[in-house]
Image (cartoon, rainbow, N blue to C red):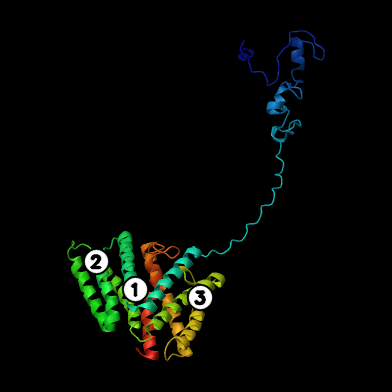
Amino acid sequence: MNDSSWGAPPQAGYWGPSDRGSVQGVAPAGPAYDAHYAQQTRPMPIVPDVPEHGGDQDDDQGAARLSGPLVDDSQSAQPYAVAPRNPEPMPDAPQPAQPEPQPQKKSAGRDLGAAIGVGVGLGAVIVASLFVVKAVFVGVVAIAVVVGLWELTKRLQERKGIKAPLVPLAIGGAAMVVAGYVRGSEGAWVAMALTALAVLVWRMTEPPEGYLKDVTAGLFAAFYVPFLATFVTMMLMADDGHWRVLTFLLLTVVSDTGAYAVGWRFGKTKLAPRISPGKTREGLLGAVAFAMAAGALCMQFAIDGGTWWQGLLLGLAVAVSATLGDLGESMIKRDLGIKDMGTLLPGHGGIMDRLDSLLPTAPVVWLLLVIFVGSG
């Protein structure tokens, strides 16, 4: 029967008239009871069955809560104390202390054994050719120039697509070195001019696209490698030419060694970080100190008519020119995106990586020696 048949819906929680008779704890049933006690009774709240503590529901939902009109849900007490399903995790156990990283030792940055071995071998060949037959030394310089030109033009083509003509550069470069030894500065300038003309004409045999950049690179290569190298053979023309060349080589090597040793041990302030991050101002001071000391000894004991104070000036100039030459080639290699110009010399790189300091230093030493003691 529908609840609406009672004429009005019963109040919430009221069970309606009882016709089951008297029950313990309940007033007698019947209409008289209902009419007499209707105004004095209150609806009983419906209390849901509460499972015993520890039943299956405890495991899934915790203890049941009381609800209904007599219970204010907003202020209801917490459920029965039941152990939480996922207890609070214990604090992490203390981790064992990690060993502190050991400070790394400074690295030399190259294979010192190979570098020293190759350097000693090259030095022996140069000194032997220099003091035995001067013409042999001229040939050694010419070979170094040709190999250096090959490395430079190859890197230009690989990295920039610039095709500097190698054939006229190699022939003209070797001729320049010989002309400097035979005819001095006049012969070197004439050979340089003819080499430049040969580069211009040789490049005309190919399509005109890229002509300007190719011949410009060729003229730069002709000046940078063979023309600067002619000042070495021009020093050889003097009576004490072999000592002059040896002084030039020794001061350049000592300058590089002083910069490397002092910079590796004490270097902190970068000299030109955008060009060569490994060079420091402390290394430059080491190069100056070493070169000036070596220059004073060489001018006093090896060069005819030289004095120690001239050697100090010569050493200072060599340290500056050698450093600038090294930075200049570093700039070229950074533009090309390479570390070394070649791999011919283990521990050193290529020939051009050894000529970088020597080439710009040669005209400086030649000029100062001419000023100090004459052309000889």
Q: Is residue 109 visible?
A: no
* Mark 1 nearby-residue class (10 Å; few <14, some 14–19, many ≥20): many
**Residue at x 19%, y 67% (from the top left corner):** 202
Q: Position of residue 278 (x, y in %)?
A: 48, 68
User: Which callout, 2 or 1, points at the residue further toward the start of the chain?
Assistant: 1
Q: Give the percent coordinates (x, y) of residue 25.
A: 82, 15
Which residue does the numbered mark 3 point to in the structure image?
258
Q: Are marks 1 and 3 in contact (CB under 8 Å)?
A: no
Circle 2 SS class: helix
Query: Quarter-wise, where is residue 368 in the image?
Result: bottom left
Specify whether 295 is left or right of 370. right
Image quarter hosting the N terminus = top right
Which residue is at the front of the view, 158 or 210? Answer: 158
Q: Which residue is labeled 1 in the image?
A: 141
Quarter of the image holding residue 320?
bottom left
Sequence order check, earlier mark of 3 and 2: 2
Q: Quadrant of residue 206?
A: bottom left
Q: Amino acid at mark 2?
A: Val
Q: Which residue is mark 2?
A: 167
| Amino acid type, callout 3 | Gly
Q: Is there a contact, CB below 8 Å, between mark 3 and mark 2?
A: no
